[in-house]
């Protein structure tokens, strides 16, 4: 059932077929699966037209609006919070719901004029990540605390505050999106030079830039399928997956107190900056 009777999925008919929602979600689930042999395509900054911007954003909203059963998700959250643990099936259900929230958050950054996460959506997604880290690493107190907060945040009245700015979005132009991506690339180029001595937080900031880009490309290739877009998504997913696996270790060290996430510095695996630099070189080459 839609989250709100005035949602874009209702205002902007026709609705996307379930096949399109399944396709984009399949892409989302593969956004960190390595494809080490996939070559980088020639066009790494694909342009999208005005209709594609609208379709892309509304596709992401419908994936969340129609794809997450909030009452059932809240029951799942409470079960995990009270038990302090999650079965494999519960972990998977939580992961799938969180992935749809994250993809919507990325859509707000990728397609809207301000290129920012709506505050409430950002907070809810962060709490989901904190809770997932907690129950995966068997931290019962953190699982309980984050679970209660998340359960309350997804109640109908509070959730309206999250949905309202998503619904009232203002799209950017194709040129504005292209300029945003070039600025993100410039930021990425500065950050990649720090990977010989970076912190967990700085590493995470870099990964988010990659995650936003693969999310943009996964949405675009759903509404405009092409082999080049498939290649670009697979190349970016390889970087995203490598960084994600390494970041999981950083989170574990943060939670067990063996490494300060914001202060302690380390050297990242060499292949990560190598692949990022190849992507950046192609984007300005």
Image (cartoon, grey):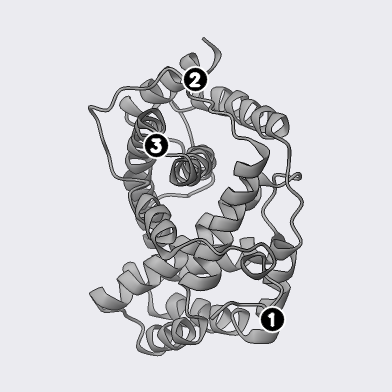
Tag of residue 264? none
Q: Nearer the viewer, residue 199 or 11?
A: 11
Q: CA distance from mark 3 to mark 2?
A: 15 Å
How many other residues sit within 10 Å of disc 2, few (<14), some (14-19) or many (≥20)?
Answer: some
Q: Residue at x 51, y 21 (%)?
A: 193
Q: Quadrant of residue 79?
A: bottom left
Q: Residue at x 37, y 21 (%)?
A: 274
Q: Which residue is mark 3?
A: 233
Say above or below: 222 vs 38: below
The secondary element bearing badge 2 is classed as helix
Mark before the other along the chain sequence, 2 or 1: 1
The secondary element bearing badge 3 is classed as helix
Q: Residue at x 44, y 46 (%)?
A: 222
Tag of residue 280? 2
Q: CA distance from mark 3 to mark 1?
A: 35 Å
Spot occupied by residue 230 in the image (x, y as percentages of width and height): 36, 35
Determine the residue located farthest toward the front in the rendered image: 14
Q: Is residue 129 left or right of residue 38?
A: right
Q: Is residue 142 left or right of residue 180?
A: left
Mark before the other along the chain sequence, 3 or 1: 1
Spot occupied by residue 121 in the image (x, y as percentages of width and height): 63, 64
- Which of labels 3 and 2 is toward the front? 3
Mark before the other along the chain sequence, 3 or 2: 3
For the image, the number of numbered tags is: 3
Q: Which residue is mark 1?
A: 158
- Which of labels 3 and 1 is toward the front? 3
């Amino acid at each position: 059932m839609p989250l709100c009777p005035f949602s874009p999925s209702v205002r902007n008919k026709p609705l996307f077929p379930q096949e399109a929602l399944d396709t984009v979600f399949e892409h989302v689930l593969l956004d960190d699966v390595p494809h080490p042999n996939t070559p980088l395509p020639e066009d790494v900054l694909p342009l999208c037209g005005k209709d594609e911007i609208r379709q892309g954003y509304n596709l992401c909203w419908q994936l969340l609006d129609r794809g997450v059963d909030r009452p059932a998700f809240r029951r799942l959250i409470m079960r995990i919070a009270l038990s302090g643990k999650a079965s494999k099936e519960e972990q998977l259900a939580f992961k799938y719901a969180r992935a749809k929230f994250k993809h919507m958050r990325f859509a707000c950054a990728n397609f809207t004029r301000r290129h920012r996460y709506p505050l409430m959506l950002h907070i809810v997604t962060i709490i989901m990540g904190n809770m997932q880290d907690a129950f995966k690493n068997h931290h019962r107190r953190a699982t309980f605390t984050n679970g209660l907060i998340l359960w309350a945040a997804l109640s109908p009245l509070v959730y309206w505050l999250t949905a309202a700015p998503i619904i009232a979005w203002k799209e950017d132009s194709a040129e504005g999106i292209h300029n945003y991506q070039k600025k993100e690339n410039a930021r990425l180029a500065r950050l990649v030079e720090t990977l010989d001595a970076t912190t967990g937080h700085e590493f995470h900031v870099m990964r988010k830039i990659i995650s936003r880009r693969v999310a943009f490309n996964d949405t675009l290739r759903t509404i405009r399928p092409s082999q080049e877009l498939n290649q670009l998504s697979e190349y970016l997913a390889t970087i995203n997956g490598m960084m994600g696996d390494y970041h999981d270790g950083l989170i574990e060290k943060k939670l067990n107190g063996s490494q300060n996430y914001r202060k302690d510095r380390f050297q990242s695996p060499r292949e990560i900056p190598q692949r990022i630099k190849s992507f950046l070189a192609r984007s300005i080459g």
